[in-house]
Amino acid sequence: MAEQNNVNTPSSKEIKSIVNVVLQSKEFKDSPIYSNLLSYLTQSTLSKNIPKETTIAIDIFGKDSGFNSNKDSTVRHHILVLRDKLDNYYKNEGKEDKFRLIIPKGHYEIQLIPSRNEKPKILNRLISSLKRWEVAVIIILLIINLFFIFRLPSVNTLSSITQTQYSVDPQDEVWSPFFKNGYPVSIILGDDFWLDEYCPDYKRYRQVRDWKISSENDLSDFLIKYPKANLVKSEIPGIPFGATDNLLDVLHVVYHFQNDVSLFMSSTLSLDKIRDHNIIYIGEFKNLRILNKIFYKTPLRYQYYPDERLFILDEKGNVRDSFLRVEAPYEQQNKYNVDYSLLVKMPGFTKENFMFIVGFGYGGRLERTKMLANTELRMKFIEDIKKVNKSVPEYFIALFEVKSIERTGFTNELKYFKEIPGNFFSESSQDSSKSN
């Protein structure tokens, strides 16, 4: 059995007993194929004879010696389903198990790791309740609502300058068109991908952030390269830095137009939560997740490796221009950064409106929501638009270069602006279907 640590590792007899408990669960009892596959992989691992894909195909699925894994995905498909069944087991019947069986991506062996539920019962119940992202969202919304509740009585005492600075005209050229359809608003935060790392020295898990691991695929690739790493995906989402400031900026405006507002994390988002809603995404490119399907309808592309770069495409799909993000080393003091952030307003599937406040880092994102909330900054933005487009279109792409020291931006320059037609989404879908 491949070991993740040397602390209290079960014996082969105990491992067989652990696997037998899993096999007797509701998840596996009525699934002879997956029970046989799990038993086979366990026995192979214990005997230190890790099978290849062809061997599994012949031994378990009755394939002949001419089996070609490039043309037949039977084994890969069943291994994928087996991983899902193990995950479902540990989310339900096996949530109190001391150890957890996993099958690393790209491998055909069973690994055993200590369960994250190995905590005192009272503490375990508390932590389990806090692992739901909804709790984090509720706390954020509660803080924001309290802010507005206690702020409202003092509105009449504010100076006329402050009222002007943060008031929103119902006919505002940037905001008003976004709400005119009357749809409820879904604000989506691009939550960071966090990890739980088991530390044998402390005999407990710690939550960690690896900036090069931003998805389950990244984690799988990392574990293939470093199989002894004690890392699993954390169930607690990472609220992006500056998100509270972003929400205070945006909600201040949104509540002027619409009271029906919901908050979601991008990692939990599904398309049914998007339809018949105006959406506002706030976060990094790499945390767009399912929203990438919408974002990639625009002539915008991004990369994180080998450097962080934003591309603008022409009508033929060729790169028209590119912008390189400059980020100071983590350990450097008084960091000088050059970030690029986008404000994209585009039509939805039917009558919805979509807004993306997105970039590589938090500096540009903070500057965008501040601009959207501040009347003076927004008027400056409108003036810049009219210099290149004569009027403010309902839908557009606006790219900004933000130079900053640490977290404070000191320049905001509009580098690119393009109007998006009102039938853009339907046209893109038709073009895509024709090309296919």
Image (cartoon, rainbow, N blue to C red):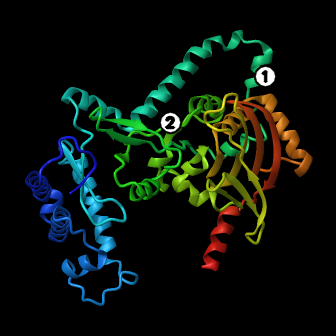
Quadrant of the image occupied by residue 361: top right
Q: Nearer the viewer, mark 2 or mark 1?
A: 2
Judging depth in this view, the residue of 421 and 381 nearest the camera is 381
Residue at (25% x, 78% y) in the render: 55
Q: Picture coordinates of residue 247 (x, y %)? A: 59, 32
What secondary structure is marked by label 1?
A: helix
Residue at (18% x, 42% y) in the render: 98
Q: Picture coordinates of residue 313 (x, y %)? A: 75, 64
Residue at (71% x, 61% y) in the render: 299
Quadrant of the image occupied by residue 110: bottom left
Q: In which quadrant of the rendered image does the C terminus lie? A: bottom right
Amino acid carrying mark 1 in the image:
Thr
What secondary structure is marked by label 2?
A: loop
Residue 164: assigned label: 1
Judging depth in this view, the residue of 381 and 56 nearest the camera is 56
Measure the alpha-carbon separation of dots 2 and 1. Answer: 31 Å
Judging depth in this view, the residue of 193 and 175 nearest the camera is 193
**Circle 2 residue:** 239
Residue at (79% x, 15% y) in the render: 160
